[in-house]
Image (tube, helix red, strand yellow):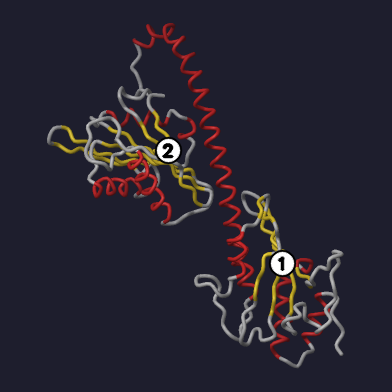
Amino acid sequence: MTATPETIEDLIAQLSTDPDPAREAIASEIGVLQSIYGEDAIKLWRPTTRSGSRSPDRDSPHNTNHSEPGTIRYEVTLNDDGAESSHQVIILVSLPPTYPSSSPPQLQLLSRYIGPYGVDAPLFGTVLRTFISRGAVEWTPDSVCVFDGLEWVKERCAEWLGERMSEKKAGELMREDEKGRVGDAHNDQKAAEDEGKRSSRAAREPPDIPTEMPPGISIVEAEPILDRKSAFVGRACRITDPSQVPVILAHLMSDRRIARAAHPVINAWRCKVGNVLHQDNDDDGETAAGGRLAHLLQILEVDNVLVVVTRYFGGIHLGPDRFKHINEAARNALELGGFLDAPDEGNAGRRQGKGRGHGKR
C-alpha cells in the first residue's frame, strides 16, 4: 500500500512514479506552479478537524474527499503586490481522478478576507465557476490548466478589491467635498470683508474670466459612477447665451476638488439665440469625449443646456467603457435637472431625482 504523502514533495514523488501518464502530467504541473509562485506557496490540503488539526487521509494516498476517492487537493497562496495595496489570496485546488483527461479542476476560495474586506458570495461563486462559466477559463481535455485558472482568479480578486477600495475612496471624496463646501462658505465671507479694501485697485486692473456663477444659473450634479477606481460625475445647467459657458467652466475649475481630476470639464453645449443655434464641445484631454457628449445632446434634442462630466482616473485603464460612463454621467445629470422633459425656459427642469443641486458658490 502506498504511504500517505506528508508534504507536497512526497505527492510529487508518488505521482512521478505512477505508471499513469496523467499522474505524471499532474506532478509536472505542480512543479511548474512551485517555480512560478514559490515552493512555500504550494502545500497539501487536508480537512480541519473539530480540534483544529489537519486529519490524515484514510481512503486513498491522494484523497481528501471521501465521496470521491482519488481526488488530489492542494492549496496555493497567491500574493498580489498591486499599485494601491498588496494582498494575499489562498485557493484550494481540487483535481478529480479523471483530470486532465476528461474533467477540469475545481478552484475554491479559502480566504475569508481580501485586504480589509470580507469575501462575499458573488466572488466565492465566481471562483467556483472558473472552468465552467462562459467567458472564464476554457478547459480542453488532456491539457493541464491550473495555472490559467489561478491567474484568472487572481485578476478577478484584484478587480473585486479595487471596486471595494473605489467605493471607499469615492465616499471619502464626497465627505471631503462636503467639508470643502463649508470651508468655501467661510472663505467667501472673509473674501467679502476684504473686497472693500481691494475694490478701488481691482477696478483699475483688467479682470480675468470671473469665477462667480452668472446670475440665475443653477447647476445640478448627479451621483458619481464608479468603475475600477475611476469616478465619473455629471453636471448640467440651463444657459441662455453662449457667453455664459466660459464663465461657468471657470467657476467649476475654481473648485479644487474638480480641478484636481484627470479630466475636470469634459463638456458640450447647445444654445439657441433667436433663430440661430450655437453649439460647441471640449474633450478636456479625453479624446473624442466632447464630441460624444455633443452627439448625445443632438439625439436628445436638448437646447440651451451645458453638460459637463468630470473624470477622476483611478490608475486602471477602462478602454471603451470610459465613454459609456461619460455619456451615462451626462445623461443622469440631464435627467436629474429635468432637461429631458418638455422644453422649459426656466433655469432648471421640473423633474428632480437623486443627486445634488448647486447654485452660486
Measuring 40% from the left and 47% from the top, which residue is drawn there?
286
The percent coordinates of residue 182 (x first, y second) are 51, 24
Residue 281's place in the image compared with 132, above or below, is above
Q: Position of residue 87 (x, y in %)?
A: 68, 55
Side of 251 relative to 154 (left or right) = left
| Residue nearer the viewer, 154 or 160 | 160
Horizontal arrangement in the rendering, residue 262 relative to residue 36 (left or right): left
Residue ID for mark 2: 355
- Looking at the picture, how far across and down is residue 331, in whole percent? 34, 46
Mark closest to the chain's N terminus, 2 or 1:
1
| Residue 277 % position (x, y) | 17, 38
Q: Name the residue beneath numbered marker 1.
A: 37
Amino acid at the residue labelled 1: Tyr
Judged from this view, the residue extending furthest toward the left is 275
As displayed, is residue 239 above or below residue 75?
above
- Direction front: furthest residue: 50
